[in-house]
Amino acid sequence: MKNLWKKCLGILLTLLLIVGVAIPALAANSSLSDNVSKTAAYMLQTVQKPQVGSIGGEWAVLGLARSGYDVPQQYWDDYYAEVESYVKECSGVLHNKKYTEYSRVILALSAIGADPTDVAGYNLLTPLGDFEKTIWQGINGPIWALIALDSAGYEMPVNAAAKTQATRQMYIDEIISRQLDDGGWNLTAKGGSSAADADITGMALQALAKYQDQPKVKAATEKALLCLSDMQNDKGGYSSYSTTNLESVVQVVTALCELGIDINDPRFIQNGNTLLDNLLSYRQADGSFCHTAGGGTNQMATEQGFYGIVAAMRADRGQNTLYRMNDCTISISSDNKSVSVGLPGKDAAVRQVAVNAAGTTFTDIKAHANQAAVEALASRGIITGEAAGGAYIFRPNDTMTRAEFAAIVVRALGLETAARNVFADIKPGAWYAAYIDTANAYGIVNGTSATTFEPDSRITRQEAAAMVARAARLCGMDTDMESYEVLNTLAQFGDYVTINDWAREFVAFCYSEDILDQSDLNVEPARAILRCEIAQMLYNLLDKAELL
């Protein structure tokens, strides 16, 4: 009788344990699904016409496709038509050096059931068969090449023009050869005592996830997991370049999901905070995500946060992982075409601003060096003047405030404004509030702190260059420059050494694209920029971006 009682008690305790664990788990599943649905709805509203690009493009498409959310068929068709148009325009060469451009597009096409081996007659896999060119940009090249090739089990493409034909094993070995002494990886180091970066370490593990049957891969993975566990902060998250941010925890979450490791693994719980707790702490009420805690909505962070929670949801449901796409049920109808104005790859939110006030001019810009630029922008309502003595003036040689710049750059890109009340020193009813919040949301302008913007502060020439360069990126322009290119561009100016380190690449980009005048003798980086100079910079940008 005593043994029977013990047996019954054991069964009862087991049932209680199952019930006690199952109830909160079901609640968590429901909450995660709700979060995915809300962010998917936000994404569809924000990225209405996805382009080829790292923002408003492939990551948004990937997240939506893998979320299971009800997306209109036209959305997939329009995106595919945009890719076809882009590939045709660049004759199949997405980038001469950055082969991650191919990998990113391959992932999005695979997620919607499209064939990357025949896009407008071009095989987008072929470049990944060139070992030297794929690894040229560093560890990102082999990482994303493997992820893309493995996403739908593509055969390694033969690249007849390659100096060295790549194999999967070569990419695996390349990644492992770059592992650091602490077990992680960073963007540039090839082994050694440099500190690991959580983002890159997470990405490397995603690429190696399918090769755990190789002892050296398994050993490298275990060492990297220990490194990531040690790097995790007391809130369950990570920092990159000394900044605690969303994107880092997303990459770790995605890595664990690809590896089949529970994201609630005890190694990744700090002070009771899990990876998912940390990831969701960046989520805004409207479903978007911020880059840093307490910051405003950031589109790049939103797209990465989205696919991070999608990866977690899929793992929770026992579905294929984010990057294992042989379960894709989406298909595209490639006869639907969508041609956009401007450069291929521009952010979907950027619009060409039509001329609506032809002939607009100001009495104080006659014979001014920047008259044509000012009038072109004024005819589109991008800049305005003010009444003075019965005439309208522009004040071309006055300086410009941060608030004024935010307003004209948002108008120049045709962005729809939305007030988000991000900064404490911006009164909700101020004329510039929505402009500042919108420019900040698209990463064009930053605050002077997490809570302040200083709208009345004057912009310097180097600050203006940074803001215009960020706007150029949204317009589809490649703003990345190698350090030697930056130096070669700036060395022609007598005072280039006075440019702040953070601004050098931005300033160099503006000069290299003739957004700033290369005939300048000096950069004068700290001088407050003039209204006429800003008008010329924005005019030059729109001209380069084919948006005039």
Image (cartoon, rainbow, N blue to C red):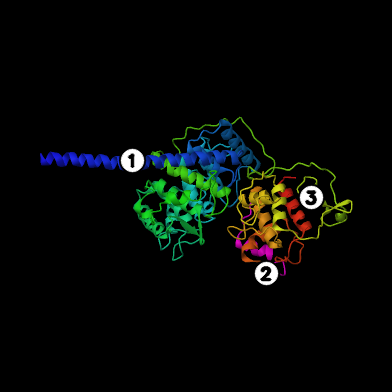
Please give left or right for residue 137 compared with residue 425 in the image. Answer: left
Instruction: Give the secondary structure at mark 2.
Output: helix
The residue that mark 2 highlights is 498
The residue that mark 3 highlights is 384
- Kindly tell me whether residue 160 is visible in this rendering: no
Q: Earlier in the sequence, mark 1 or mark 2?
A: 1
Please give left or right for residue 82 compared with residue 285 in the image. Answer: right
* Tag 1 and tag 2, C-beta contact below 8 Å: no
- Vertical placement of 534 versus 487: above or below? above
Q: Residues within 10 Å of mark 2 (few under 14, many from 20)?
A: few
The residue that mark 1 highlights is 22
- Vertical placement of 462 versus 284: above or below? below
Q: Quadrant of the N terminus?
A: top left
Q: Residue at x 43, y 59 (%)?
A: 233
- Which residue occupies the foreground of this view, 293 or 343? 293
Query: Which residue type does callout 2 highlight?
Result: Thr
Per the model, the C-alpha gap separating discs 2 and 3 is 33 Å
Q: Residues within 10 Å of mark 1 (few under 14, many from 20)?
A: few
Per the model, the C-alpha gap separating discs 1 and 2 is 62 Å
User: Where residue 180 sits in the image (x, y, percent)?
Assistant: 43, 61
Residue at the left extreme, as displayed: 1
Magenta segment boundaries in residue numbering: 477-498
